[in-house]
């Protein structure tokens, strides 16, 4: 059994071309994730800083972890990576900020995948279970990919809050979870300040992405030192990750991060009101197709073309400055 690798450059090198280079349609849909909400809305044509929040970067981190797990337990790596890169392609523009109450990835996945080549379309039933977080699944590659997705979210969300939104770790005081314990360690605050500085003071997006990858891989290292897959049966290990992730959701994600990310940063209510009005004028099917076609950057122009007022469109622009002050805590830098 090989050991883990913690090279952040390998993380940044993960790409869908490894498994889908010859399929231009699938590649196009995956590339769209570079302009789709990840932690925060990826839309602001005048500020490249929002690139760091794109959904694509989340999936890239999932792919990196999934590769590690697959190689460790001997699961087919390419098959594992296909699950990873396919699992998020049927996202609406603005992701959960527009989808909740309007659209279900799992319920629509069979219809969505019918349009794709047959060698890809057959993944739809497995991916429906993937979105429903069902473990164990039909094969080892599925289990690895889903476990990696859950773990990546637990490791990246506190890091996005602290470094990406420039919020002091004090905001997480009183919560529990591996990521909180890891990032609130005083010895790591210096590195987190350096991370926030490059985005919020220097506007250096690429440097931020590299430092973020370093912090993320360090968090993964710490997790594997505490909970090494070689010490478990793989199914037990994935259940452990699921349990840790659920505890993180209950203590940190839902009460602390979601309210900040959805409303204070990404203006979810304004987005949902636009979607609601479009459904009345265009109908549910046309709105569904529109939101699967556009991305965070192209959606505002389409909203205007469909008669949405400019002021309402302007109101969906995200903001990452001043979040700490609005929360009543100190900024990190």
Image (tube, rainbow, N blue to C red):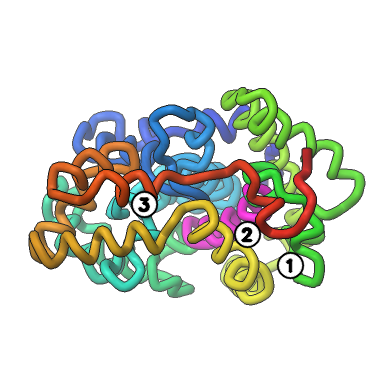
CA distance separating discs 1 and 3: 27 Å
Q: Which residues lie in the magenta part? A: 144-160
Where is residue 282 shown, x and y percent of the image?
Answer: 8, 60
Q: Which residue is mark 2?
A: 154
**Magenta region's main secondary structure?**
helix
CA distance separating discs 2 and 3: 20 Å
Under circle 2, the secondary element is helix
Q: Is residue 235 left or right of residue 227?
A: left
Q: Which residue is mark 3?
A: 94
The numbered mark, 2 or 3, whose residue comes first in the sequence reads: 3
Q: Are marks 1 and 3 in contact (CB under 8 Å)?
A: no
Q: Which residue is mark 1?
A: 177
Mark in front: 2 vs 3: 3
Foreground of the two, 264 or 83: 264
Which residue is painted at 28% across and 54% down in the image?
A: 90
Q: Is residue 178 magenta?
A: no
Q: Is residue 281 left or right of residue 258?
A: left
In the image, which disc is placed on residue 53?
none
In the picture, residue 97 is in which quadrant?
A: bottom left
CA distance separating discs 1 and 2: 8 Å
Foreground of the two, 188 or 274: 274
Q: Is residue 155 magenta?
A: yes
Q: Badge 1: few (under 14), some or many (20 or more) residues near its Cα, within 10 Å?
A: many
Where is residue 317 shown, x and y percent of the image?
Answer: 42, 44
Q: Quadrant of the C terminus?
A: top right
Under circle 1, the secondary element is loop
Residue 216 appears in view: no
Q: Are marks 1 and 2 in contact (CB under 8 Å)?
A: yes
The numbered mark, 1 or 2, whose residue comes first in the sequence reads: 2
Residue 168 appears in view: yes
Under circle 3, the secondary element is loop
């Amino acid at each position: 059994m090989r050991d883990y690798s913690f090279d952040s450059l390998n993380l940044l090198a993960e790409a869908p071309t490894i498994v889908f280079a010859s399929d231009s349609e699938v590649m196009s849909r995956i590339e769209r994730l570079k302009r789709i909400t990840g932690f925060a809305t990826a839309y602001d044509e005048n500020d490249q800083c929002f690139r760091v929040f794109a959904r694509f970067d989340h999936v890239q981190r999932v792919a990196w972890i999934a590769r590690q797990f697959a190689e460790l337990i001997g699961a087919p790596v390419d098959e594992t990576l296909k699950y990873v890169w396919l699992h998020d392609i049927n996202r609406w523009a603005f992701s959960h900020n527009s989808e909740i109450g309007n659209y279900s990835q799992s319920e629509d996945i069979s219809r969505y995948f019918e349009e794709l080549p047959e060698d890809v379309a057959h993944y739809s039933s497995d991916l429906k279970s993937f979105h429903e977080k069902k473990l164990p699944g039909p094969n080892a590659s599925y289990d690895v990919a889903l476990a990696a997705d859950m773990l990546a979210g637990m490791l990246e969300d506190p890091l996005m809050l602290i470094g990406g939104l420039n919020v002091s770790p004090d905001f997480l005081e009183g919560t529990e979870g591996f990521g909180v314990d890891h990032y609130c360690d005083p010895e790591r605050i210096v590195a987190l300040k350096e991370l926030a500085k490059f985005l919020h003071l220097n506007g250096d997006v690429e440097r931020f992405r590299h430092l973020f990858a370093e912090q993320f891989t360090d968090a993964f290292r710490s997790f594997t030192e505490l909970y090494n897959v070689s010490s478990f049966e793989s199914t037990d290990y994935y259940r452990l990750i699921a349990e840790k992730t659920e505890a993180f959701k209950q203590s940190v994600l839902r009460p602390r991060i979601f309210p900040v990310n959805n409303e204070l940063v990404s203006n979810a209510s304004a987005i949902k009101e636009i979607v609601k009005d479009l459904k009345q004028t265009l109908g549910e099917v046309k709105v569904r197709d529109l939101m699967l076609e556009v991305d965070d950057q192209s959606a505002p122009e389409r909203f205007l073309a469909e008669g949405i007022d400019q002021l309402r469109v302007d109101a969906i622009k995200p903001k990452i400055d001043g979040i700490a002050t609005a929360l009543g805590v100190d900024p990190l830098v």
